[in-house]
Image (cartoon, rainbow, N blue to C red):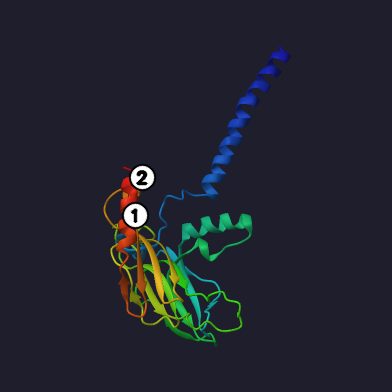
Amino acid sequence: MNSKFIKFLIILNGIMLPLLVGFGLYRIIVEFFPDKNDFPDGIILGKEFEDAKKDSLALQGLKYYSPVDLYNSKNKYLPISLLTYEEEKEIYQSASLANDIGDALLKYVNVIFLDENYQVITSLLDKKASILEIEPQRNRYRYDEDKLDKTVKYIVYQIAFEDSNKDGKLNSGDNHDLYISNLEGGNLTKVTENINIVRFEFINSNSQIFIKYKSRENIREEHKKESFAIYDIETSNFLNMSSINKELDKLEKIIIN
């Protein structure tokens, strides 16, 4: 009798232990690695924001780290980020595993510009926005590294001011356009409109921006074709890139169709 009971317990443990371990691993993954397909909360707008104010709830708070030096300038810039309480809790739990929390985990909502004495020059924006990317021009690598590269004059951003998908939040799910400012955060100018930026980079001695983009059509993402554009900073004009786009269309017909 005892031997049968012991065998039963062994079999039961063999079944239950993997189930318990599997459930424990599942809870750890859910807790520390939330679904990456979900858009972050972003700036809360509309009814959710009004309800929060009525209930006196502090749903969101600003986060920021140290000012960043700008090349070819004595100025510095301080990106301002935003977290909801629940997001902050998740990020700090995840980051505690690596003992590190970096800017990359946060989303930007504004930028403060400082002079060499850390005094405020200006803030980039005077209204709510989502900023996906902040990209200052960088010095070109040359043999005479001691010589200052004075072509570095601008900073480029991807910014959204409107809740384009109407979900009540300004976040990475909304349409972001390319903007450019000087190294003091002034003269903010819109560069692109009605296109989705795939990537961009400064070219030709920092005088132009090479842009890869997709159309902002209401079709499946994989059906949108990538195209190219070059923006000339001084003239604020786009250069004709029809030849490369036509060639890509021709190759698509040959290769895919």
Residue on which the image places disc 2: 255
Residue under circle 1?
A: 248
Position of the C terminus, as image quadrant, is top left
Q: What amino acid does circle 1 point to?
A: Leu
Residue 7 vertical placement versus 37 (above, below): above
Asked whether residue 173 is in view, the answer is yes
| Whether label 1 touches label 2, CB < 8 Å | no
The furthest residue to the right: 3
Q: Identify the residue at horizontal 53%, vertical 75% (top origin).
A: 140
Q: In this view, does 10 lie above or below 51?
A: above
Q: Where is residue 186 in the image (x, y as percent from the top left)?
A: 39, 82
Choose top left, top right, bottom left or bottom right for residue 134: bottom left
Q: Which of 111 and 252 is in front in this view?
A: 252
Q: Residue at the spot x=46%, y=48% of the render?
A: 35
In the picture, measured across the screen, residue 51 lies left or right of residue 4, that is left
Image height of 3 relative to 171, above or below:
above
